[in-house]
Image (tube, rainbow, N blue to C red):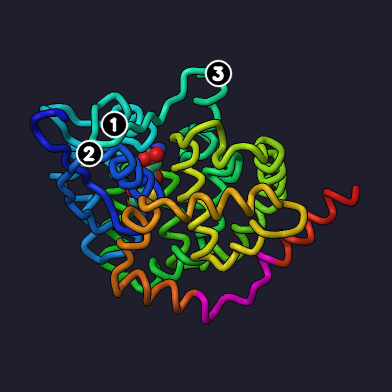
Amino acid sequence: MSESKITLYHANWSLCSQMVRVALLEKGIDFHLDHIKLCDQYPEGENLSKEFLALNPKATVPVITHCGSVICGSQKIIHYIDSLQGKNDVHLYPQDNPSEFEQWVSDTTITEGVGFAETIGTILPVFSSPLIQMMVKKLPFKSILRILLRHPIKQRKYIFVSMYFFSAAKKFPNLGVSNFIDELMKIENMLSLENDYFGKSFSHIDINMMCLFHRLKDLQLEDILSTPLTPRIRKYWMNLQSRSSYKEGILNYYGAREKQIVNSFHQQNNGELLIKLKDKLYELNNA
Ligand SMILES: N[C@@H](CCC(=O)N[C@@H](CS)C(=O)NCC(=O)O)C(=O)O
């Protein structure tokens, strides 16, 4: 183990923070946590503070600091974590097919520069947009103004502001339906009945899938993982949920605030998106 402990700047409910927490737990690496109240969920918007922007000028979590270095972004962080010796004999980067592997990691991450809804990693934020809008609408006007003035990512700032004033997120999820079903079938075909995970052993790809599939659960879309047309995904998702890192890195970070938001989202969800996804899945498989 390295001498000084990693500090992880994260948010309880952020997809990319979940990925890094799961990676640290899988490796058996001890870490300090610093929770950042993100501007789309909390009036304080700590990711827009001078101190945080000095760490990550993009204003996003996760970020780690370790032995004097600052590393931003889940993909780079998990790569770095894997190079460290933890308590567990886990290797998140297998040796064979490194370029194909990296591509899958990137496609299952919220990767900068990739358009919304182009990959499974960028579809989940689009599906989550009604939930994010619910949170944004509860912010005081002062916080929205602060986002407008300070958020360094132009596209995000305008999305948050248009969610606040125009309920722009209502139709966003539809943008991801077709690509999501294509991605799901691609994953179903990649999985093999002999392996418990995406490849021969548990890896960075599995961490990302665990977090993305879990977000489907928050959004009441989980049923799309257990249709008769996706038997391998169904089994794979059960395997992912049975890892202790799923509970320790994801479920244990739901505080009263997160639970309350998920509950009110469920109360107002009409299930339309799940129907659209199922229709698309069957349409594709009957074609
Ligand atoms: N490519 C980055 C994306 C990071 C990212 O978008 N983080 C989100 C939470 S999952 C965030 O910090 N959002 C706050 C904001 O944009 O204001 C990664 O993989 O870590």
Given contact means CB atoms under 8 Å apart, are the residues at marks 1 and 2 in contact?
Answer: yes
Task: Tell me how far mark 2 sits from mark 3, CA to CA.
Answer: 26 Å
Q: What stretch is highlighted in magenta?
A: 266-274
Above-or-below relation of 275 to 46: below
For the point 16% across and 30% down, the residue is 1
Residue position for label 2: 29
Mark number for residue 81? 1
Front label number (1 vs 2): 2
Q: Is the magenta stretch mostly helix, strand or loop?
A: helix
* Callout 2: SS: loop
Taking depth in this image into account, of 28 and 151 the one nearest to the observer is 28
For the point 83% across and 49% down, the residue is 284
* Marked residue nearer the N-terminal end (2 or 3): 2
Q: Give how far across and how far down residue 111 sits, in percent.
A: 46, 36
* Callout 1: SS: helix
- The answer to whether one can see residue 249 in this image is yes
Above-or-below relation of 6 to 218: above
- The answer to whether one can see residue 60 in this image is no
Sort mark 2 into few (<14), some (14-19) or many (20+) by Cα contacts within 10 Å. many
Residue position for label 3: 97
Task: Tell me how far mark 3 sits from mark 1, CA to CA.
Answer: 20 Å
Q: What residue type is disc 1 on?
A: Ile
User: Magenta stretch containing residue 271, yes or no?
Assistant: yes
Q: What residue type is disc 2 on?
A: Ile
* Marked residue nearer the N-terminal end (1 or 2): 2
Sort mark 3 into few (<14), some (14-19) or many (20+) by Cα contacts within 10 Å. few
